[in-house]
Image: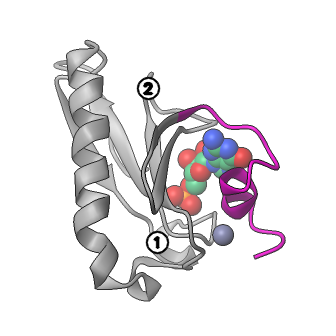
Amino acid sequence: MEDCIFCKIVRGEIPAEKVYEDDNFIGILDANPKVEGHTLIIPKKHFKTLLDMPNSLGNEMTEGVKKISLKLIEDGKAEGFNLVANNFEVAGQIVPHVHFHIIPRKKGDGLKILA
Ligand code: 5GP
Ligand code: ZN
């Protein structure tokens, strides 16, 4: 997708703070983080919502989520985390390229999560 911002990040055409990469996914820091360490896991291929993403990528995505989250915990940036995906505009999806938010949580942080 020519004009998709996340496709551009995957292609290296616009910069992002990459914290994770495997064959089919990247993890980048959110440009407008709710808290320090707020990360997005994004498939390298363009799919609009989770409904378009093949199930065969599910295991690899779960593995990526676990690695990113564990690192956040090990680095002292999280004690737990929320995993949030907004699918379709009505649910708050702004970037039409499927992604999951990994939001670090700490005791007493007071965050209200709807990413
Ligand atoms: P959503 O589509 O899940 O509602 O929100 C998209 C998320 O992507 C937002 O949290 C926003 O801050 C983040 N975002 C949008 N554009 C960019 C970008 O160019 N770089 C990065 N790192 N994050 C972005
Ligand atoms: Zn895209």
Question: Residue at left 63%, top 64%?
Answer: 95
**Element class at badge 1:** helix
Query: Could you say where residue 80 lies in the image, as x and y percent from the top left?
Result: 17, 31
Q: Which mark is residue 6?
A: none
Q: Which mark is residue 91?
A: 1
Q: Is residue 7 magenta?
A: yes
Q: Residue flagged by tag 2: what amino acid is it?
A: Val
**Residue marked by disc 2:** 35
Question: Residue at left 39%, top 62%?
Answer: 85
In the displayed structure, does residue 40 sit left or right of residue 7? Answer: left
Pointers 2 and 1 in contact (C-beta within 8 Å): no
Residue 105 visible in the displayed image: no
Q: Is residue 108 magenta?
A: no
Question: Dot 2: few (<14), some (14–19), or many (≥20) neighbours within 10 Å?
Answer: some
Residue lying farthest front? 23
Query: Could you say where residue 103 lies in the image, as x and y percent from the top left?
Result: 35, 38
- Out of 40 and 59, give the one closest to the viewer: 59
